[in-house]
Image (cartoon, helix red, strand yellow):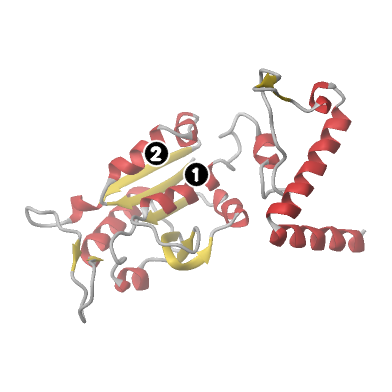
Amino acid sequence: MKQIGVITPVPSVVDTLIENSMLRQAVNREKVHFHVVNLRDFTEGNYRQVDDTPFGGGHGMVMMAEPLFKAIDHLKKEMDFPVNGRIVYPSAQGVQWSHDLAEEYSKIKKLIFICGHYKGIDERVITRDVTHEYTVGDYIMSCGELPAMVMIDSLVRLIPGVLNSSESAESDSFPTGLLDAPYYTKPREVEEMTVPDVLLSGHHSKIDNWRQIERENRTRERRPDLWKKYLKQCEDSEKES
């Protein structure tokens, strides 16, 4: 069973996302076990403080090293964490998260995610413990729980047995190198908008061909960068064959 540790000062945010998403299914199917750690349990004093002002001055607060060190050490022991295990810190300074990374991480048995807040975490935590930093986009978020859970969701859904249909995950946008095709469900007509006839034909090869054309058209129009990469992959495949 995969084990994922999450260190956060607001565990209710993480617990809510787990309980109300596909992640709950992963837990119920015993594919993943989450260790959600409340960072404030490793603080001292009545205020359970996890942040302080930065040395050198400046605006904002920084998450303190000592509570994080204690929480990380606790999780390492609880999870029997390997010496070379990956500890991830979602950060605007990190590498762009991608489907390829999600696939890679879906195969790793034990992971720890640190959810930052404010101006970030004390650099000494990164120096001592963080092995990888990733960003989910070129923008700033107010808390680390959201990007951490985005990464976790994207990798957990790729674990065999989590989704009802592995083919569903494989046909989503990005695994094929293309954006996905449009989908329709009942009723056949809504506000004078109808389902394309080919999807009602029962002719599976024609449906597959239609969906491939739609994937290509959507990718070319909406994501020229992906389209260029896809054409290069097709070209390379032809050369190899």
User: Which residue is nearer to you in this view: 4 or 123?
Assistant: 123
Could you tell which of marks 2 and 1 lies nearer the N-terminus? 2
Mark 2, residue position = 17
| Left/right of residue 20 with respect to residue 108 in the rendered view | left
* Picture residue at 50% right of the left edge, 60% below the top: 137
Is the C-beta separation of discs 2 and 1 under 8 Å? yes
Q: Quadrant of residue 181?
A: top right
Residue 177 appears in view: no
Quadrant for the C terminus, please.
Answer: bottom right
Q: Nearer the viewer, residue 3 or 26?
A: 26
* Residue 92 appears in view: yes
Q: Distance of mark 2 from mark 1, alpha carbons?
A: 10 Å
* Residue 237 screen position, x and y as percent: 86, 59
Q: Amino acid at mark 2?
A: Leu
Pointer 1 local density, CA inside 10 Å: few below 14, some 14–19, many at least 20: some
Q: Amino acid at mark 1?
A: Asp
Label of residue 153 in the image: 1
Q: Crowding near pointer 2: few (<14 within 10 Å), some, many (20+)?
A: some
- Please tell me which residue is depicted at 38% across the width and 57% down the height of the picture: 141
